[in-house]
Structures are given as C-alpha cells and as structure tokens.
Image (spheres, rainbow, N blue to C red):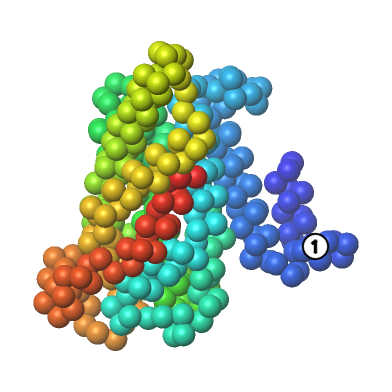
Amino acid sequence: LALKHLHDYHSKPHPAYPFHSSHPHLFLFMKVLFIQLLSLLTILLSASGKTECRLSSLPPWSHKVLAGGCSRAFAQAVLYPVDALRTLAQTRDGRTLADVGTGALIKGCGQTSSFALFTGAFQFGIYGVVQPKYGPLIASACGAAGSCLVSVPQEVLKQRLVTGVYKNFREAVQKIYSSEGVLGFYSAWKPTVSRNVPFVIATFSSREVLQRKIVEFKERNEEKKGQMKLSSGDNLLIGISSALVAGLATQPIDVIKTRMMTQAASNAAPYKSAFDCASSIIRTESWRKLYSGFGQRAVYMGGLWGI
C-alpha cells in the first residue's frame, strides 16, 4: 500500500509539494531506496517465519544484513564526490574536473549509491553467517566475493558516468545493455574481485585483531574482564585504520580496475587484459601511477568503513 501511494505521488505530484518537480533525481533515489529497504525487510521476515516487524524476531544474521546494507548505502552516498575524484585521478588520459565539469561529482549518485544497500547486505550478511563456523578470514572472503554480484555493475555505471562516457543513468543502462549485453555490466569483473577479496580479507582480519587488542588493553587498565565494550569512537578508529591498511595493499589493483572500466572514455587503444593494463602503465607511465588516486581513496574508504 505504501509503495502504491509513493508511485501515485511520483506519477502525479501534488502542487503543494514542489520537492518532486525541483529534485526529480533525488526523489527517484528515495523511492528506489525505500523499495530496497522494504524488500530487505520482507526477505528477512520471510526467513524468520514471523509476521511481526520486530528486530528481536529476526534471525541473528539478519541484524548484520540490515545494519551493513543501510550503513553502506548512506556512507557511499555521502562520500560519492570523493570517490568521483579518485576515479578521475586514475583515468588513462588524466581527466580533471575542468574536463568533465563539477556536476560529475554527483552524477549518478542517487541511483548507483542505492546499489550499495544490497552490496552491504550481501557482504555483511554472508560474513555474519559464515564467521561463527569458519572464522573471519574465510567469512570476509566469501562476503567480498558474494557482494561483487551487485558491486561490479555499480562500479561500471558509476565510473562511466563520472568520466563522462554517458550523460545520465538511464542512457548508461540502455547503451551498455544494447551494445554489450548483460555481461557489459560486469566489465573488468576479474580485477574487481581480485581487489575486493584481498581488500575485505585484510580489512575484516585487521578489524578483528584491533578490536581484540583494544578490549584487552581496556580490561588490563580498568579491571573489568569480560565486561568491556567498544565505544563508538573505538569502532570508528578501528574501521578507518583497517580500511587504510587494506587500501594501501590493494591500490594497484584498484587503478587497473578503474582503467579497464573506463576505457571507453579514452581514445587510446584498449587494454587486452588486466596484465596488459598493468604492464602498459609501468612501461609507459612508471609504477607510481599504480598508486594514483590513493589520497582520495584513503579518504573515501576511511569514511566508508568508519561509518
């Protein structure tokens, strides 16, 4: 019923509400986000066999799905301009804001950030299910691999919009599908998985170690063994620190992934493979280019994992 009213409002905006006409893309993003949140709740309630919408009635792993999905979607939307700058810094022809305009900083923000709801849900949900049995290392690898089902199309659309390959989200979807088919949305999926899996393994693993060390330190100093809990500040520090460690280790793969996803924005001959991309960068631009955009990515990933 709520979806029906939302659809009616979107189709026939009331004159008393000028928000729809002045911010159509933002309103569409809110609509998509609302639908995805409702879908997640429906799936989780179905899995628990409960009809009452209470968090306590949901299975334990579902809390990670909801928290991970919502926090990631919010974080990516807020940090979208920073990630756009990282994409531009990694392009083959060295594009800047002067080339694409300041509007590129938020182009496709609403639509592509909504993908993050399911990316986070997949990643944290799989991690929450697998971790108790197999530990954080295997769980984080499985979560990273599973989340790529959503994160790869998100990255393809986002990076091509930012670099000006397409004018808007609708055109991007239509042209990628018509010229490349469904597989076009999974362009450069190999380097993406090769970046995401080690990145998340390093992030989750270092997060577990940092959490344990901080709790042990607090227990030694405050003599409350087994009763210490991490504060919000502790969790923020742990999230940022673990993301920076993982980001430094995976930055070259991130550059290769960006180059291959945004080849259409350059007039140069396309790379044949990820290995060809890496060797070409080292041969023609120096190895330092493999760390281009690290500052922007550090700010983005620190904020993303901190949230």
Label 1 residue SS: loop
What amino acid type is highlighted by mark number 1? Answer: Pro
Q: Is residue 256 visible?
A: no
* Residue at (52, 35) in percent of width and height: 232
* Residue at (40, 53) in percent of width and height: 301
Q: In the picture shown, does residue 8 fall above or below 158?
A: above
Q: Is residue 84 visible?
A: yes
Query: Depth check: 187 or 74 in front?
Result: 74
Query: Depth check: 74 or 114 in front?
Result: 74
Task: Report which residue position mark 1 lands on.
Answer: 13
Q: In the picture shown, does residue 51 fall above or below 105?
A: above
Residue 299 point in image, percent of width and height: 42, 58
Image mark count: 1
Residue 122 point in image, percent of width and height: 41, 40
Q: In the picture shown, does residue 241 fall above or below 270?
A: above
Q: Is residue 17 left or right of residue 86?
A: right
Q: In the picture shown, does residue 280 fall above or below 206?
A: below
* Residue at (55, 50) in percent of width and height: 74
Neighbourhood count class around disc 1 (C-alpha, 10 Å): few under 14, some 14–19, many 20 upward: some
Q: Is residue 73 left or right of residue 205?
A: right
Q: Quadrant of residue 283?
A: bottom left
Quadrant in which the N terminus is drawn: top right
* Residue at (58, 19) in percent of width and height: 57
- Of all residues, the one furthest to the front in this rendering is 221
- Of all residues, the one furthest to the right in this rendering is 16
Residue 192 point in image, percent of width and height: 28, 56
Residue 21 point in image, percent of width and height: 75, 69
